[in-house]
Image (spheres, coloured by chain):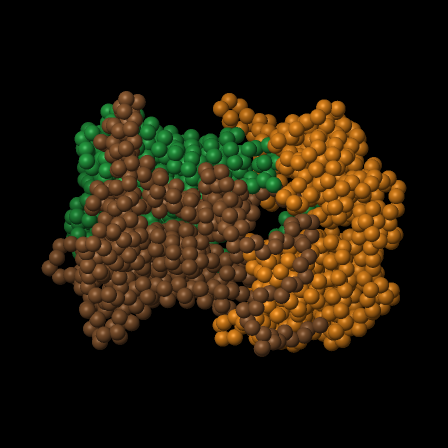
Amino acid sequence: MKLELRGITKRFGSLVANDHIDLTVEPGEIHCLLGENGAGKSTLMNVLYGLYEPSEGEIVVDGTPRKFRTAGDAIDAGIGMVHQHFMLVPVFTVAENVMLGHEETRSLGWLDRRRARKKVLDLVDEYGLKVDPDMLVEDLPVGLQQRVEILKALVRDAKVLILDEPTAVLTPQETEELFRVMRALRASGHSIVFITHKLKEVKAVADRITVIRRGKVVGTADPASSEKELASLMVGRPVKLVVDKDRAQPGEVRLAIEDLTVLDGNGQAVVDRVDLRLREGEILGIAGVDGNGQSELTQAILGLRAPAAGKISLDGQDLAGRSPRQILNSGVGFVPEDRQHDGIVGDFTVAENLVLDMVTQAPFGRRGSINPGAVRDNARQRVEEFDIRTQTIESPAGTLSGGNQQKVVVARELSRPLRLFIASQPTRGVDVGAMEFIHKRIVAERDVGTPVIIVSTELDEVVALADRIAVMYRGRIVDIVPPTTSRGDLGLLMAGVIPSRDPAEPAPAAEPDATGTEPAAPTATNESDATPGEEDPA
Amino acid sequence: MTEDNKSTPGEPSKAKPAPTKTTEPAGASASTPAKPSLGRAMLDAIITGNSAVVTFLAIVLALVVGGVLMILADQDVLDEYKYFFAAPGEALSSSWTLVSDAYTAMFKGSIVNPDSFSEGSIEDIFRPISETITQATPLIFGGLAVSIAFRTGLFNIGAQGQIIAGAVFASWIGFVVDLPPVIHLVFVILAGVIGGGLYAGIAGFLKARYGAHEVIVTIMLNHIAVLMLGWLLTTDTFRRGGQAQPIGKDAHENAVLPNLFGDNLRIHFGIILALLAAGIYWWLLNRSTLGFELRAVGSNPDAARTAGMSVARAQILAMVIAGAMAGLAGVSQVMSSTNPAHTLTPSIDAGIGFDAITVALLGRTKPLGTVLAALLFGALRAGGSVMQASANVSVDIVIVIQAVIVLFVAAPPLVRSIFRLRGARKGAEGGPLAAKETVGVQS
Amino acid sequence: MADTVIAPDVEAPVNPTGEAADVVRAAARKKALITGIGFILVGLYALWAFGFGTKSGVDAVFGMTVPNRDTTEVGDLSLPARAVAIAMSVLCMVAGVLRIVLDRSRLAIRLSIALFLIAFVIAFLVWAVAGKQMSFAGALQNTLLAAVPLVLGALAGVIGERSGVVNIAIDGQFLFGAFAAALTGSITGSLWAGLAAGMVAGALIGGLLAVFAVRYLVEQVVLGVVINLLVTGITGFLYTQLLQKDPEGYNNPGVFENIRIPGLADIPVIGPVLFDVNIIVYLMYALIVIVHLGLFHTRWGLRARAVGEHPTAADTVGIKVNATRYRNVIMAGAIAGIGGAFLTIGTVGTFSKDMTSGAGYIALAAVIFGRWRPLGAVAAALLFGFTSALATSLQPLNTSIPSQFLQMMPYVVTIFAVAGLVGKVRAPAAANKPYTKG
């Protein structure tokens, strides 16, 4: 099946998300759609999949123009989609999810579960997508949930498969496995549209590449092109590839975590016996695939989650039993991983958001009442200093772009003397300019001696910023390694495998002295994200 | 990099925010509007239908709906519609007479009766307004009770139960002790505040501690309060002796909210308390750190928690404050001129608990809005009883009008499409009426 | 090769190990201990109040013949009050001990709770009835009558919430259904027309709820409350203006006759209670089965639940989310309307102002207490019906328990349920979340 998009334009109010996009997907190819976060890739695919109606342009399938009003129309035309956020009903079984919208029924709409199971099992055999049809989806790991998504498309006879950022939640090894499935599908005549912003993956799997920037197609490329060429196409201007920073000057141990265990609502250990030492003036990067306990670890330090066991002490003081407010007030800065969810109050003004966790303290609050003048003065200073692009300081923070919202959070957290700074996903969904700026501020904070923890699922970011890297897997610190460690080894660690050691051996507790004294970064500069030009160490 | 932010002491605090970097949000190319003239702004408001216009139109529509219902319920007028094609004028004119008589009576009963200028005393002239304010008084308390909880992200459907709790406590203090003037009233008011606050606190506590949905809990607590009141009125402690009916004991004279302008007008001290409460609510929301926290918790509890606020504390406090306000409505129900014997009765809440929800919604949970909405509904109530007496139209129509107003206010696009107005900007409307969360396709 | 790397993911969902598991076990233990001790304390109270509080040598007599039904006489059940009360109180304590000892299996937990509840209720009843007589069969009959509207309302609530729309307006649907059934039944002289009108009225309110919730994205809880007010106003107004002025013409629909099913109705005690009833009750039986099977075994149910759990997922497989919600909420409204019709043309035969007296809210409570499952909701509705029947039956016996306290039971129980004190409840994920598209 040949799929063409001609002049697709999608506007949201005054915002043009897609601007006259042309795209042709030939049968039996893996066509890669490359672009930064927010370039308009997902919008384009939602148009193609009938979830958005295009403002202009047409979709042509095998030479016939088609109109997709609903996802059902797209499905009928042979298009299947694996969404970035899985579209699975967690409380349904695999088979129920696969058949939803496409049910096998007997008379009166009675579900024929046996036939549904059989269909799933047939496909499982055909493409090697091993998964149990009777498991509840919520009990499956993400890698398997993704398979269910692919099964959903295949059971509907999809000829074109759209994969939207499919690797974001996978370990490198799971990613490899996905690529194997993609190649198998290509071999059986399916075409695949693979959406990503990761250059290495593009080179590994694509047959053809279309690059999108700011809603427009800016060019097509060959997988043989260098990463540098691809990156400059994607980003549009030469990016600074590295984070400038001097070698760390670690001092005293400031934060000590001993034997920390945190449980989730079901009593599962999400942080499992973690030991960490953090020294003055160093950045500890915590790497790992999403959902391996990184968030819970930071929340435990902040007092947002009560540990089930273990001890956290800052400058020798035990933090047990302190409220988040006391911990924040004692000089801990925290940038949460999901700014919209945890970082800002969208209805509040920029000025209010800039004092969100300080409003009870002088000069903003006195004896229960707020000093509006102080709040405004603070806002003006921060907006200036951090170059926050907002119409006024009284605009609701929810109206700012993602990058500027993130700057609000970072500005707030860095605006007071700190004893510890923790940033989770500090640059997720942020444009390149804001990313550079935030990285610079984080390094500057380190350089005044504050111990810093950076949690990121972007390996490149961790490698670029950190002086030491702790890799988390299923709540455990698998190992603590220098940033010079190869990508391959880091990838294995992220999958819970300790390279060149006996994998059965439990993860060793980090030896702060060993890691502290090692020749951490012989290079004064480390790689950064969107790293065109550097050869792939893996 | 961590400078202290000292506010310049000389700077006038009301100064306009200085023009900060007025760069547009990325991607959006919205043009910054120049300050429009007043006339232009009003015209814009009417064309696009902003919230004030929508509210006005909703009231008009609700009155129309009420009128239609009156016609449908009048046998004589309906009979004339059987001959509509023979004599359309007849049917239409008697419909008009019916509806206009009713609404005229309502106006006379709630704003002013023109006849009183020529015939009545000065008190007769002010009586309708006094009645409106008297009816509005408990509605202001109730509306504030619902509003505060809303702002903290809680639906307080339990004003009814809290009013009852406040009334029971107040009434008990009112008859069980005999204290000097003023002091007794202060104790009665405190009792009402405590009763309502404690009762609402149950819901707040269960929400904060166990995550029990406050809507369900407050609804259940309403029913429990009604039953509890029914039982209390069978006990010797509360029931007036020598009577079969479940009626409470009379309060002492000193426990009563005094009338403001003598015995002939029912307007009483409660309205002063109500306006004071609205003022406190304004300060709490806009100028206090507690209000800042309540609003933050209401708007984004996760961010509030991450910023070190205690969501549980905010929820409990918000409910307790809300209950205290509702308790004041209870005080007003027992201890004011609307209850001549100042006793507890099984229906002491008089439906105010649910009307309070509509008041808060119509007032968009803002202090002034709540007061104005309460005055409107107070006027409907005051006018409604006059209408029932003089135009023979049941006062129940007032509930219909109230509910329809709120339904229309809840759906501005509906009102606009009825009047063919252009849409206002998105995000300019909604407030407590809009769904807190929606699910949809993410771009 | 890659398969082997992923293998641990497939095989072994992490089990809590070491300290983590200890903590979980300790929490479960603590819960079992607290509940168990609670049971024992309540048992002790029962022993003191009901057991030793009953005079010895007195019998509690329970009438087992269903009143006003053409059926065979069943002898009264006469129990030695003190002995039975003491025995049952002890059973309460035994249940507590079992709860502590058998804290592992779910079945054991449920059985111990059931044992406790049944023993406590019997102990209480024997104490209250000691030396007097109460018609137990009559109470069962009242239970069913009280439960019919609750069951129908709860089914409506389950369908709505499973589809993602919270229906606080059940009470309004009851009231409007009751009103329309009475009015239409009186005007047309046909009870069937009345029943149809009740359904249409409920569906109308359902439609109103759907339009505002789905189309205009109004907060559904607030919306439900306002709609209830609206219906209270409309029915109250029309009642005063029309029905009250001409009760013969407008408020005299009559009542459906009972239909006796031979054979089944001859089963002692429960036969006549369950199978000598009118058409609306049989309709309810059918609807319970249909809604349960429909929700869990048909395409309609699968799609409804998908829309209520994850509407975006449903949309991406071509299910029309909002259309599904409209359809289901309106259909649910019709079911609640039947419940409303039962209040007038199924039992008392006339409409009166605010006659639901909050039954819709109890139905809502049954939805939650029944954990959003049709059969669970039915069980909860029956339990609530039983407490209200008990309140009625015990009133003439002059027990020291005020009838208001018994009437409070459903509300108190529901508060405990939503507070998670009697097990976890989890609402459909997308309930009260409108679905919007860009």
Tell me if I can see residue B11 in this picture: yes
Q: Which residue is drawn at 51% across and 27% down?
A: A110
Q: Where is residue B60 in the image (x, y as percent from the top left)?
A: 38, 43
Q: In which quarter of the image is the N terminus of chain B?
A: bottom right
Q: Residue A151's spot in the image, x, y percent? A: 67, 34
Direction from residue B374 to residue A489 in the image, left or right: right
In the orientation shown, which residue stands out farthest toward the front? B118
At 70% across and 26% down in the image, what residue appears? A65
Q: Can residue C213 be seen in this view?
A: no
Place residue B88 in its image quadrant: top left
In the shown orientation, is residue C34 left or right of residue A291? left
Residue C318's spot in the image, x, y percent? 59, 32
- Indicate the colour of chain B: brown
**Looking at the image, which is closer to me, A25 or C112?**
A25
For this rendering, which residue is in front, B96 or C257? B96
Residue B217 lies, with reference to residue A149, above or below; the image says below
Q: Is residue B15 above or below residue B375?
A: below
Residue at screen point 66% across, 36% down = A55
Residue C436 to residue A458: above or below: above
Quarter of the picture holding the C terminus of chain B: top right
Chain A image colour? orange
Instruction: Measuring from the top left, give residue B272's x and y in whole percent.
Output: 33, 66
Residue at point 52%, 57% (across, down): B299
Most foreground residue, A441 or C296: A441
Chain painted green? C
Q: Would you say A62 lies left or right of C406 here?
A: right
